[in-house]
């Protein structure tokens, strides 16, 4: 998982501002579902069309672009956005690939997590991207 610092660096380079609040907003569920225990489960809440839709309805276009850059980074943490895409004009095409990945239920494995069951006192199925 990409750190907030990595998301901030990407946005500073591509947009000239860190957009730290947006990165924290997108990752807010990582506090409830720690990555060490639940892997990428926190991404199922806002790293998708639903999360972007909320931002499109409430924020300016650059904030939405910052969120899309965040999703791209989380989709492929190893890519160097600055070298590979160079500027903001290529972000839309790359984002479309990333959002399809996060939205596509065909790429999801349903896994039974004992820690969730214990914490919630019942059965819980969790879908994680392959």
Image (cartoon, rainbow, N blue to C red):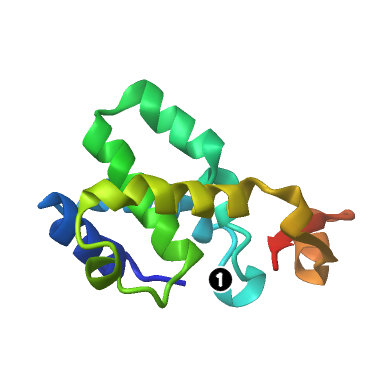
Please state if 67 lies on the left or on the right of 37 as rendered.
Answer: left
Q: Is residue 118 above or below residue 28?
A: below
Query: Residue extending furthest left?
Result: 16
* Residue 87 image position (x, y, % from top left): 19, 55
* Nearer to the camera, 67 or 37: 67
Residue drawn at x 45%, y 29% as measured from the top left: 54
Tell me the residue at 26%/31% (across/down): 61
Give the total of numbered labels.
1
Q: Is residue 51 left or right of residue 104?
A: left
Q: Which residue is the extreme one toward the top?
A: 57
Image-based side of 123 in relation to 107, left or right: right
Quadrant containing the C terminus is: bottom right
Q: Looking at the picture, does residue 95 appear above or below residue 33?
A: above
Q: Indicate left or right for 94 with 49 as reference.
A: left
Residue on which disc 1 sits = 35
The answer to whether 30 is drawn above or below residue 47 in the figure is: below
Number of other residues with Cα within 10 Å of mark 1, as a class: few under 14, some 14 to 19, many 20 or more = some
Viewer-side residue, 2 vs 30: 2
Q: Position of residue 77 (x, y in %)?
A: 43, 72
**Residue 17 percent coordinates (x, y):** 13, 51
Q: Residue at x 32, y 37 (%)?
A: 64
The residue shown at (62%, 71%) is 39
Element type at marker 1?
Answer: helix
Q: Farthest right residue?
A: 123
Q: Position of residue 40 (x, y in %)?
A: 59, 65
């Amino acid at each position: 998982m990409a750190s907030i610092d990595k998301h901030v660096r990407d946005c500073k380079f591509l947009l000239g501002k860190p957009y730290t609040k947006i990165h924290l907003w997108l990752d807010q569920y990582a506090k409830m579902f720690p990555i060490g225990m639940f892997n990428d489960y926190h991404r199922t809440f806002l790293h998708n069309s639903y999360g972007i839709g909320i931002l499109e309805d409430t924020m300016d276009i650059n904030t939405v672009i910052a969120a899309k850059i965040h999703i791209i980074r989380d989709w492929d943490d190893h890519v160097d956005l600055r070298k590979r895409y160079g500027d903001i004009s290529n972000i839309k095409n790359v984002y479309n690939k990333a959002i399809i990945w996060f939205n596509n239920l065909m790429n999801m494995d349903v896994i039974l997590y004992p820690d969730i069951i214990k914490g919630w006192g019942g059965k819980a199925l969790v879908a994680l991207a392959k």
